[in-house]
Amino acid sequence: GRGYGEKLIKKILEDFGDKKILLSTHYGGVGFFRKYGFKLEVERPSRHPTLISMVRKPSPKEDALLKVGRISSTFDSRF
């Protein structure tokens, strides 16, 4: 691709990374969102069988760093 998805998710995390973020994606998008700390959410089944619900909650350390602007919007897959 052209990197539009990566630019968009980085901006979203920059602006809202200190909050819980919910999203729905197709099977092919799961790996992309895992790179940014999203996990599969099994508590919210989708009415659409091809959509996967995912959630991202920042760790307390990331939350503190985001609040003081000391973290970039690239996250690894350790979450």
Image (cartoon, grey):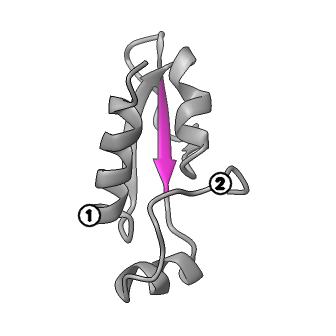
Q: Secondary structure at mark 1?
A: helix
Residue 65, position as x, y percentages in the image: 47, 83
Percent across and percent down for residue 14 are 33, 63
Q: Describe residue 31's horizontal placement relative to residue 74 as left or right.
A: right
Circle 1 residues within 10 Å: few <14, some 14–19, many ≥20 = few
Q: Amino acid at mark 2?
A: Asp
Estimate the x, y position of residue 78 in percent, counting from the top left: 73, 56
Furthest residue in direction left, as rendered: 15
State the residue at coordinates (58%, 37%): 42
* Badge 2: residue crowd in 10 Å (few <14, some 14–19, many ≥20): few
Q: Is residue 49 above or below residue 12?
A: above
Nearer-the-camera pick, 40 or 30:
30
Residue at (38, 64) in percent of width and height = 17
The answer to whether 32 is drawn above or below residue 63 in the figure is: above
Visible residue check, residue 41? no
Does residue 6 appear left or right of residue 60 in this picture?
left
x, y percentage for residue 57? 49, 62
Q: Which residue is mark 1?
A: 15
Residue drawn at x 41%, y 78% is: 66
Could you tell me how far apart the alpha carbons at marks 1 and 2 are, in whole angstroms?
18 Å
Could you tell me which residue is drawn at 39 percent across and 61 percent down? 20
- The kind of residue on which mark 1 rests is Asp
Disc number at residue 76?
Answer: 2
Span highlighted in magenta in the image: 52-56
Q: Which one is nearer the viewer's eye here, 9 or 4?
A: 4
Mark 1 or mark 2: name the one nearer the start of the chain: 1
- Label 2 sits on a secondary structure element that is loop
Farthest residue to the front: give it.
2
